[in-house]
Amino acid sequence: MKKRSTAALTALLVVVPLVAAAPGQRAEAADSRPGDSARSAESTLVKGVDLDTVTIPELQARMNRGSLSSLRLTLAYLRRIKAVDPRINAVLRTSPTALRQAAASDLRHRLGRTRGPLDGIPVLLKDNVNTRDMPTTAGSLALAGSPPDTDAVLVGKLRAAGAVILGKANLSEWANFRAAKPTSGWSAVGGQTNNPYVLDRNPCGSSSGSAAALAASLAQVAIGTETDGSIVCPAGMNGVVGLKPSLGVVSQSGVVPISAEQDTAGPMARNVIDTALTLSVLSGRDTVRAGDAPSLTDAVGRPGTLRGKRIGLWRLPSLGAEVDGLMTRTAERLTAAGAEVVEVSLPYQERLAELEFPALLSEFHRDIDAYLATRSGPRDLAGLIEFNRTHPREQSCFAGQELFEQALAAPPTTDPEYRAMRAELTDLSRRSIDEVMAAHDLDAIASPANPPAWTTDCARGDNDVIPSSTPAAVAGYPSLSVPAGFVGELPVGLLLMAGDRQDVELLSLGAAVEHRLDAWRAPRYLPSAPSGTSR
């Protein structure tokens, strides 16, 4: 047996480099037949599997049976990236070792030595997550030189689980913490990412490339990061699922920071089960709660009933009448499924809005200086500001770096005034959720995750005032965006939030909501929205 496995591994590792030079050529050699049109490269079908709708458990069942290989799956995604990504510009680069990783997974499947649910599954990483074998730029030319010395901790967990690190996704430069009026989805390294549903519309930031790539079925799952809204808004605006976990569930070591008090990486996918399975790997365990809490697989793999669930609806009419109408229809569908939906209003939001940004400025200065000290290039925030002033490409969409400059002048995190701000933020944000959930005996609070996508415009910047993400983001509580429906051609997500470390319970509820709403549909890559569509 050992001789057979050694021979098989040798054969795979000899063959794979021969097809690894050019992803497009590699894909055609593996999947095309004479006479295939260019359209076949855009197909979501591979070995009878529809990439748009297949789940990780279904893929694993096929790989265990031998009817699908990780190599074939990885080739299919590489082929779609080559064919489809030029329209949306979501993928910065693919990994030169992706096919080797897939081949090694196939051998483990053949020998019955798989490492769990992500073994052989292609994953895209937001390009602010350190990888030792690919550049990690945060979208900035300042970090576009040598890769980091080591992987982020979460990347190590993915590799140990056998996931195929497919490549890096574009993002809003510096996770949208540079200019006062940025354009989400734009970076100097990657240019502008487009919304796959309507190409002149914005993908929301800053995990824009991760979300857009998933909507276009360019990977099975992706990793995003969030400080406030940067997972859940792109997920909603691109019609996919995104989880911002409870603070501390996923390690932030090796991730380009904004604020240790709010930053977290999290999983994104086209469905809740894949999101949950990815969290189980990122968190290093199958549950994020102690005691008798259900495992992620048990909680999400078989969507339960909504009967008896109590959900508070925070409407946010400021997002527009069309979104509010969609929330009304969503509440009616959840009620018809047996849930009790009660309208709520979250307190303390004006005060949170006053305090959050000043606190983040101080935290960013502290945390970005510490990160830059580990990389080649500018060694601190002052050096980064000077770099941007002297590199015209950094100013090609918008020139401003007002947030950098304000952070440089912000009081240190040792300052008593800062400490008082952060303490008040933590207290009020947690109370805003805890008090409402206790008063109404709720399982979760729901709100719209996003408005319809606005047109991308470098001169104007983003047209976003989206308050729904802030309470959970500042509190460090979990929030989950699932597809709720559409305004015209543009997706809108339903944001669910719950109490601290209730990630499993939130995912379980999200799976039931997803099953009931059944709101996902594939993008059509329209060049622009029909006339009359808002924003």
Image: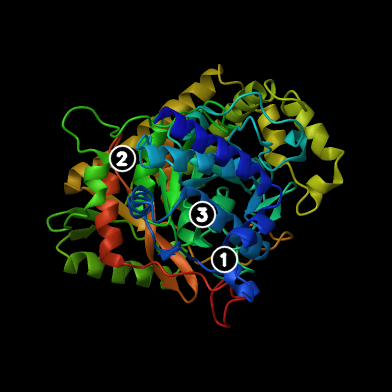
Question: Nearer the viewer's eye, disc 3 or disc 2?
Answer: 3
The residue where tag 1 is placed is 196
At label 1, counting other C-alpha atoms closer than 10 Å, the crowd grade (few under 14, some 14-19, many 20 or more) is many
How far is disc 1 from disc 2 in space, using C-alphas?
Answer: 29 Å
**Does residue 4 appear to the left or right of 289 in the view shown?**
right
Which amino acid is tagged 3? Arg
Sequence-first tag of 3 and 1:
3
**Does residue 193 appear to the left or right of 188 in the view shown?**
left
Q: Which mark is residue 503?
A: 2
Question: Given contact means CB atoms under 8 Å apart, are the residues at marks 1 and 2 in contact?
Answer: no
Residue 370 at x, y percent in the picture? 63, 21
In terms of secondary structure, where does tag 3 sit? helix
Sequence-first tag of 1 and 2:
1
In terms of secondary structure, where does tag 2 sit? helix
Q: Residue at x 25, y 40 (%)?
A: 435
Question: Given contact means CB atoms under 8 Å apart, are the residues at marks 3 and 1 in contact?
Answer: no
489 is higher (above) or lower (below) than 156: below
Q: Residue at x 74, y 60 (%)?
A: 459
Residue 531 at x, y percent in the picture? 58, 83
Question: Nearer the viewer's eye, disc 1 or disc 2?
Answer: 1
The residue where tag 3 is placed is 72
